[in-house]
Amino acid sequence: MSVPEVIPIRHEPDYRTSTIGRCRGGQFFASVTATLPEDWSDGDWQSRKRWYSVLHRFDEAGRHLDSRIQFTGTTADGERKAVDAAGLLLAEWLDALPDRQYQDIAIAPFEVRFEEALFGLVVEEDEDGEPGEEGEEEGEGRGVWVELYPDGLGFTAPWDGCYDT
C-alpha cells in the first residue's frame, strides 16, 4: 500500500497531538520532545537526552514551510526544568500564531536536521515483510508507514489520522 501525499493527523486535546492545528496561512505541528544521539551506546543517557521546543509550519496544502527548534536542556541538567522551559517557550510561539485553532491537520512528509537529530514526518518501510515490532511474526510487519521524529508517532493505513506510539 502506498503512502498518501498528505498524512491526516487527528487533534487529540490533552494528549500527544494537542498542539496541532491551523492558523492564518497554513497549518502547524508543535511539541515538546527529546532526542538521544543515533549512535548513542554508553550508559550516560541523562547527559545525552536533549529536550526541545519544536514548531513545524506548513502551507494550506500541507507542504513544509519551516521549522523552529530550540534546545532547552538535558535530563542531567534537570528533566522537569528542561521540559518546563520547553513548554513555556512553545506556549509563546503558539500564542504568536495569528488566528490559531487547534484541530486536525494533513501534512506531507518532510525532514529537518537540527543538532545532528532528525525532526520530521518520514516514510518508513519494512524490508521484505520483516517484523516491524517486537513480538510480530515473520511477514506481519507494518509494511509502509510514516513516523514522526523524534516524537515516535507512527501513522499507517487506513490513514485516518490515528497513530501508534
Image (cartoon, rainbow, N blue to C red):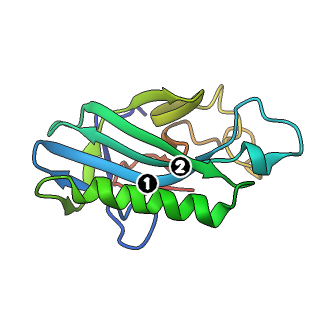
Give the residue type at disc 2: Asp
Mark 2 touches mark 1? (CB < 8 Å): yes
Judge left or right: residue 23 versus residue 106: left
Mark number, residue 31: 1
The location of residue 145, given as percent across then percent down, is 49, 39
What residue is shown at x 74% (from left), y 42% (from top)?
Answer: 48
- Looking at the picture, tell me which residue is in the foreground, 42 or 59: 42
- Looking at the picture, tell me which residue is in the foreground, 72 or 2: 72
- Distance of mark 2 from mark 1, alpha carbons? 8 Å
The extreme right residue here reads: 43
Q: Can residue 3 be spotted in the picture? A: yes
Task: Residue 95: name its quadrant.
Answer: bottom left
- Looking at the picture, tell me which residue is in the foreground, 32 or 137: 32
Query: 10 Å neighbourhood of mark 2: few (<14), some, or many (≥20)?
Result: some
The location of residue 52, given as percent across then percent down, is 52, 48
The location of residue 35, given as percent across then percent down, is 62, 43
Judge left or right: residue 62 versus residue 84: left
Secondary element under disc 2, as helix, strand or loop, is loop
| Residue underneath mark 2 | 151
Mark number, residue 90: none
What residue is shown at x 28% (from left), y 32% (from top)?
Answer: 64
- Looking at the picture, tell me which residue is in the foreground, 49 or 152: 49
Name which of mark 2 and mark 1 comes first in the sequence: 1
Give the residue type at disc 1: Ser
- Foreground mark, 2 or 1, reads 1
Task: Residue 129: name its quadrant.
Answer: top right
Secondary element under disc 1, as helix, strand or loop, is strand
